[in-house]
Image: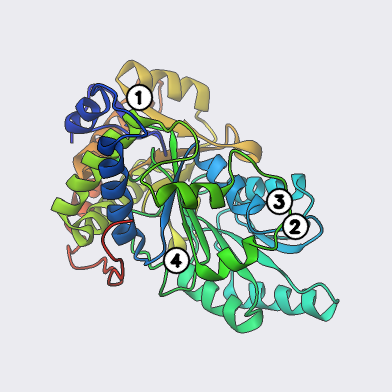
Amino acid sequence: MTHDVNLRIPGPTPLPDQVREAGSRQMVNHRGPEFRELISRVTGRLQAAFATRNEILIITASGTGGLEAAIVNFLSPGDPVLAVSIGSFGDRFAKIATAYGADVTKLDVEWGHAADPARVAQELRAMAGNGRPAKAVLLTHNETSTGVENPLAEISAAIHAAAPDALLLIDAISGLGAVPFDTDGWGLDVVATGSQKSWMSPPGLAMISVSERAWDAASRASMPRFYFDLARARKSLTTGETPWTPAVGVLFAMDVALEMLEQEGYEQVFARHAACAAAARAGLSGLGLRLFADPAHASQTVTAAWVPEDVEWSALNKQMRTHGLVIAGGQDRLSGQILRIGHLGSVESEDVVEAIQVMGDSMRELGHEVDVATAVGAARAAAQGVSTGGARRAPATAVSGA
């Protein structure tokens, strides 16, 4: 999947030509039959990708809008909430809950590491022992600020055992669609993702799955909401509409992108992302960079590495951009200390190999000695070494339509 600029950030991601062209189609009436057919196709395809029988609700917003919707629809001010944070976006999820008055207990995990299921369960039991049983647990599936993927299946099982009444609210913005995921099998109550990540689509849509258990909680929740009122979205979906004017062009694009992913087959999609991740890790290591994430829980969609002490990030970033490579730097406390290569959505392993080549050439042009050929060879070999059967997906339980 080649592009004029090798955009290797964790999102927005490059768009295939067919997707770009679909997004430029003439508008249709968002209260008419063409749109009803469109949103029915898209939500049905997303059900299969989420591996759920739940309705998929689509709101016009960034992923953060999806997280806000996940908070305000199912909680009341003062509700005890456990927020498990493994990075900047876990912190954001907790801040949203705090802003709306939830009683948030924060479980901070050292950046670069995944959450320990046993520790999450221990914290939930402690909250219950203090008379504050958690109404919900906030979890990040894949943390792009650190390049770490949480073991979501294991953590959700631990939560169900320790606090069976707690809702599981999941930020799946940067992982869902690129790695194995099982909404229903893992008992996830609210799952939010965004169009600009693994879905090969432009920014502008948040897609949310809601369990029946979560809908029951929503009937009692009292946090303020209007634009992000998912009950309105659910009611509108019964007539093939959205409560507010939707991003019709993004839906056109996503319809084509989802069809492309289905034609590729999700097992192959997962294997492709695994190959890209392997290439990124091997290539960065070959350039002498130290990987940031715990190898046991390294993300399949973004790889983070320490910027070498003798390399200035701003200079390296500027030099890479002259060669058409755009990657991401560190966020918050890691600004200027790490770099991040995104490899999700419309990406092949050769895009990552090219990024390693440009990064190595740029380092040499700035006066740093690196063995670029060895790094490139290691990246390509690592990608080729990933078995296409190595990324298994839980069987989809979706029903067609929405």
Q: Residues within 10 Å of mark 2 (few under 14, many from 20)?
A: many
Question: Nearer the N terminus, badge 2 or badge 3?
Answer: 2
Q: Name the residue at 18% across, 68% down.
A: 389
Q: Amino acid at mark 4?
A: Ala
- 243 relative to 117, above or below: above
Q: Residues within 10 Å of mark 3 (few under 14, many from 20)?
A: many
- Residue 137 lies, in percent from the top left, at 64, 65
- 315 relative to 237, above or below: above
Quadrant hosting residue 219: bottom right
- Label 2 to label 3: alpha-carbon separation: 10 Å
Q: Residues within 10 Å of mark 1 (few under 14, many from 20)?
A: many
Question: Nearer the N terminus, badge 4 or badge 1?
Answer: 4
- The residue under label 2 is 76
- The residue under label 1 is 362
- The residue under label 4 is 296
Comparing labels 4 and 2, the label whose residue is closer to the camera: 2
What secondary structure is marked by label 1? Answer: helix
- The residue under label 3 is 97
Question: Nearer the N terminus, badge 3 or badge 1?
Answer: 3
Quadrant position of the N terminus in the picture: top left
Q: Amino acid at mark 3?
A: Ala
